Amino acid sequence: MHSRTTAAVWLAGAAICGLAAPAFAQGAEQSVGDAAEQGVGEIVVTAQKRSESLQRTPIAISAIPAAQLDLQGIAEAKDLSAIAPNLSVVGATTNATAAVISIRGIPTSADETQGYDSSIGVYVDGIYMARSSAATFEVADIERVEVLRGPQGTLFGRNTTGGAVNFITRAPSSEAGLSLRAGIGNYDMRTARAVFNTGTLADSLRMSFSYLYKQRDGIVDNLLAAENRDPGSSLIHSARWSAQLDLGDRVKITNIFDWTRVEGVAGYQQLSAVGNGNTTDFPSTLSLGGNVFPVVQPANVLGYLNEATSLDARCGTPVSQISTERRTRVCNNSAQPSVDKLWGNMTRVEADLDWLTIRSTTAARWWRNHIAGSDLDGMGAISGPAFSQASLLNGMPLQVLDLIPTLSPAARTALAAAPVPTTTQDLFSTRNDRRQKQFSQELEFVSNSGGAFEWVLGAFYFKESGAEFNPQSYAFVIDTNAAVFNAGNFGALAPLLQAGNPARYRALAMQSALGYTSDSESFAVYGQGTLRPGGPDGRLGITLGLRYSWDSKDFQVYQNGATPFTDAQLPNNTSSKKFSAPTGNLTVDYRASDDVNLYARVARGYRSGGFNARQNTSSIPLTPFNKETIWSYELGIKTQFNNRVRLNAAVFYNEYKDQLVTLPVPVGEGQSFGNITVNAGKTRYYGAEIEGRFVVDDHLSLDAAAGYVKTDPRDFPAGDVNNVIRNVASIQHLGYAPEFTGNVGATYRRPIGSQDLTARVGYNYTSSFWMFGNPLTAPFGRQTKGDARGLLDAQIRLDRIAMGSAEASLTLWGKNITNKSYVVRAVDFGQLGFATTIYGDPRTYGLTLDVKF
């Protein structure tokens, strides 16, 4: 079925002769009446630091305008999945604001600790958002979104090996006005938003003020919590102030301040797979190329759950809470809301001279996150046998204890009558406190000559600091027959002790915490020039861009276990490292005609190295991982015919060296849930994408996108049973890299009396993808794959409804109309013996009223 769905997406795209999200001229609003006259229109983008036509910009870029963003309810990064080829987005595991973004198979980090830098750059008005968890900005009045695919190591620069997503907000209007929005939906969704423009004041100042309130109950019924605390619930308050001041005809000052508070419960982590002690399901070794490799063994959690009981009868038995199908009524005993507070300010000064634009951008952002409690095992509270050395013989049959000569008769009698102690313990629960702040300064010089040579020069400075304290509580299940009552310890008595064991599987209650501080600093200089021997409208263009980046990082882990490190330990867990690299691109484009533009591009990207906070630093010094680099080769074509058809396509080949890979590792006693980060050698990516739009007639337009990417690991290190490092690339599956993405949509517009009716139906598809693709360290890799899914959305809007002096529009919308059930995120807890999955939103729908004064 997945193959048929994939084929349908490609065939539908080919049938309409164009595959990409529609976009219109920068800052323009397209009404129903002028849709046919404008056709596909001109798209103006700023991806190369200057305003220029999308069709003449020789890079793979999709631009989604305000009209479509608003109609489809796209307001921030986590809403973007599948709207552009080879783009996918999945949500967070513990807080409501984070997301994992993947472009051309290269994702942002799924681990949200601050020792990692992202491989996908997320920007708002050109401001780099260092942490995906701190990149929510739904209150902003978005004018368009630009998705740049492939390394953007020259002008965007910092850590954009996979690509960049830039949200451009709408500037304050020169005309006074007030826009109000109110919306309702299922799951008791309520939305209210106001945007007020002052118009031009004193012939030079324009300001806008906006406020957003948004609330929704959860999408899964947690029997142990109120509806507004169910998984998926959220409450958002957000405010934004934007001002532009003209100093004469040449200088413009822009200042934007924003504040957001998000209180929400992350998606429900459903217990979907557990260890069962079966070596057929979970072999202890794997043979590859004549070598034998050890495989992480999951604890036999199934055995323990069979001996445990639920404290709340509504939850059923512990085993009954394991499911590979989406559950709608669940027990989650410590699911507390995540509270994110974000605020920031950006000041931009632009001087527009006759031949040069000088632009200075200063920005600062702050983020605070508090999670009072997260139950990550997906079950209600359970009680089961507890492991302790002192109680191992409790409840053992007296006839067996009589065979142990070291025990006195009284001790034997007492032990036989003693119960096995119990523990009320989640399989895994956690709390978290995180903070981050960043400052950036960028200075740009952009030529205005419009001649045969255009150029950009710039310098960029960035400074960031952050900290995290993450207490964790988990149960480590021990098979006492194998670990204690074995022949090595008890000789011939072992079979009798095993047969009489009153509680074979017992949980060792563990408490640990992860705590660290992080500081980083980055500086870069860059330049890019385009030469057109025939002048600005010449057919041939040659672009050369170069950038050099310097990064430094300081990291201190002060706890990674049950207790903070001592003063003697801290020096081994404090480390600094510097990284630097040149990046850039060489692009040749040829305008074969006014309608056809061909280009070839070679680009180099760089991602800074860093530190893995979850490294076991109690036994070895804190060790940095190295930088990674990527070389990208791309051929593309951009076409537009009769202002009715736009069709853009590209093929690419990427070679990633020293790629960072995070692997789960066995948990040692007293340590936090851990992983290691390695520079995995070499990976190749290759693929294709096509996008476009077709205006059929005065009323109907079609749009779609399709992308294919193949990941090919070439060098991936792992130690065999003899601790010899060998290449196991042939069995690796890279995470968060769906092979196929695609979307198709149809928009129908027509006037109805004095009103305008717009109806749209869209279908987007993402193929299945791995999240934990290393079979040596992830025993539940297949059970934690993201499901292939095709989601159907639709919107109907009636515009130009007269309301006195105001004008209103009414929108009826629905997402995932077929109520598709699909896994969107998962966690493989490895040796702890279980895995959890998070399902995407079910069917949602609502009604929105907009009024403009």
Image: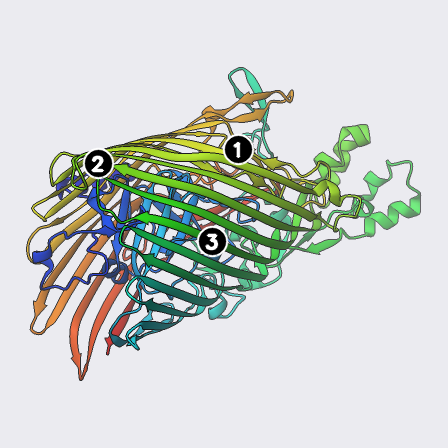
- For the residues labelled 2 and 3, the Cα–Cα distance comes to 31 Å
Please, what is the three-letter code of the amino acid marked with disc 1? Asp
Work out whether 90 lies above or below 219: above
The secondary element bearing badge 3 is classed as strand
| Image quarter in which the C terminus is found | bottom left
Category of crowding for the residue at label 3, using alpha-carbon neighbours closer than 10 angstroms: few (below 14), some (14–19), many (at least 20): some
Q: Is residue 353 visible?
A: yes
Question: Viewed as shown, does residue 207 lie left or right of 462?
Answer: left
Of marks 1 and 2, the one in the foreground: 2
- Mark number for residue 281? 1
- For the residues labelled 1 and 2, the Cα–Cα distance comes to 63 Å
The secondary element bearing badge 1 is classed as loop
The secondary element bearing badge 2 is classed as loop
Of marks 2 and 3, the one in the foreground: 2
What residue is pinned by disc 2? 532
Of marks 1 and 3, the one in the foreground: 3
Category of crowding for the residue at label 1, using alpha-carbon neighbours closer than 10 angstroms: few (below 14), some (14–19), many (at least 20): few
Q: Which one is nearer the viewer's eye here, 602 or 263?
A: 602
N-terminal of the pair, mark 2 or mark 3, is: 3
Please, what is the three-letter code of the amino acid marked with disc 3? Gln
N-terminal of the pair, mark 1 or mark 3, is: 1
N-terminal of the pair, mark 1 or mark 2, is: 1
Q: Which residue is at the far top?
A: 290
What residue is pinned by disc 3? 441
Marks 2/3 in contact by CB < 8 Å: the verdict is no
Please, what is the three-letter code of the amino acid marked with disc 2? Arg
